[in-house]
Amino acid sequence: MTEEMRIVSADISTWGRFQGRDELAKHLAGEKIAKWQALKAKCYDCMGGYSDGAMDCELYSCPLYPFMPYKGKTLTKTQLIRRKAPK
């Protein structure tokens, strides 16, 4: 396992439980995963574990976008308010 994989493996434990988490964990553990699992894992990784919630990434130029698990899902008004609120 590379250093980058070790870092990502450690981060996953703090990320949300959304589609792609288990698949990414299996990949990082060296297990073989199916193509559809790899797609979910990559979206989960790219979105940082959906730290802002499970929503559309809107990265239309991404070749995996047509398969994105949360394509078309937008944030609710409450989620938008929380996102804009100063911390």
Image: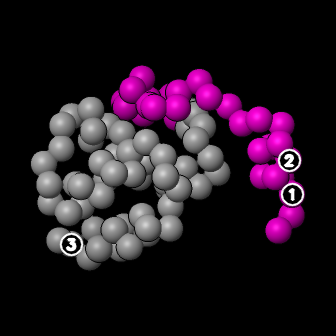
Q: Give percent across and percent down for residue 24.
A: 31, 53
Judged left or right of residue 17, residue 33 is: left
Position of the C terminus by quadrant? bottom right
Q: Which residue is the site of mark 1?
A: 85
Report whether residue 42 is seen.
no
Q: Give percent across and percent down for residue 21.
A: 39, 51
Front residue of this view, candidates 18 and 82:
18
The answer to whether the residue labelled 2 contacts the one labelled 1, judged by CB atoms less than 8 Å apart, is: yes
Q: CA distance from mark 2 to mark 1?
A: 6 Å
Judged left or right of residue 28, residue 21 is: right
Q: Which residues are magenta?
A: 59-87
Q: Which residue is the site of mark 2?
A: 81
The disc label shown at residue 2, or none: 3
Judged left or right of residue 57, residue 25 is: left
Front residue of this view, candidates 45 and 19:
19
Label 1 crowd bin: few (<14), some (14–19), many (20+), radius 10 Å: few
